[in-house]
Image: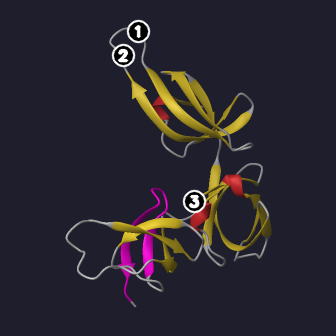
Amino acid sequence: MATTADFRNGLCFNYNGDPWKIVSFLHVKPGKGPAFVRTKIRNLNTGRLLENTFTSGIKIDVIRVENRKYQFLYSENNDYHLMNNEDYEQLMMQKDFIEGVEFLKEGGIIEVLFHADEGMPLSAQVPSHVVLEITFTEPGVKGNTATNATKPATTESGALINVPLFINEGDKIKIDTEKGTYIERIKE
């Protein structure tokens, strides 16, 4: 058992009979009344996001979880097929349970969160930084570098992202998948 003092982003716990994962939280100590924790939690069975308030100090039942690396093979409608590279076990997950799915390309590595006691997959997440190639963008205007101007670009995974004007088609860029932003151009 744990308490609200143990809350952290990514913590998984049982609440009302379902497994939940903390997306974000904030400890609040009002001037009047007891302290509480305002949270955004995601249901790992349905994918639903919920804003909830917990009274400070209540006990929660933490779920033991483990991360395993899987390779993305292909997608079929709303289902994504993944494979464990160690034992070649294949797994199918719905698009709603994968965070950052728009930055996932075929052959890419993804971390799948498993319930350690039941061996059941709960959710998946693309790595925090990925390198993708630009497949389409308008050509940049030469000499227009005085401002931090950006333009839209499409990556090989199909994601639309804003990039600086000097980025061209065929360039590889590093992307922060949590914020969906450009980090840097990769030189080969």
One can see residue 2 in this view: yes
Q: Marks 2 and 1: in contact by CB < 8 Å?
A: yes
Residue at left offset 58%, top offset 37%: 41
Q: Does residue 31 show up magenta in the picture?
A: no
Q: Which residue is mark 1?
A: 33
89 or 43, nearer to the observer = 43
Task: Give the residue at the far top of this rendering.
Answer: 32
* Residue 100 marker: 3
* Residue span colored magenta: 172-187
Residue at left offset 55%, top offset 22%: 58
Marks 3/2: CA–CA distance: 35 Å
Please state the horizontal and vertical placement of residue 72, each as a whole percent of the image. Answer: 68, 72
Amino acid type, residue under disc 1 in the picture: Gly
**Picture quarter containing residue 52?**
top right
Q: State the predominant SS element of the stretch in magenta.
A: strand
* Residue 2 marker: none
Q: Which residue is mark 2?
A: 30
Mark 2 Cα-neighbour bin, 10 Å: few <14, some 14–19, many ≥20: few
Q: Compared with residue 33, is residue 52 higher up or lower down, i.e. above or below?
A: below
Query: Which corner quadrant holds the C terminus?
Result: bottom left
Marks 1/3: CA–CA distance: 39 Å
Q: How many marks?
A: 3
Amino acid type, residue under disc 3 in the picture: Gly
Q: Compared with residue 142, is residue 149 higher up or lower down, i.e. above or below?
A: above
Task: Give the residue at the far left of this rendering.
Answer: 146
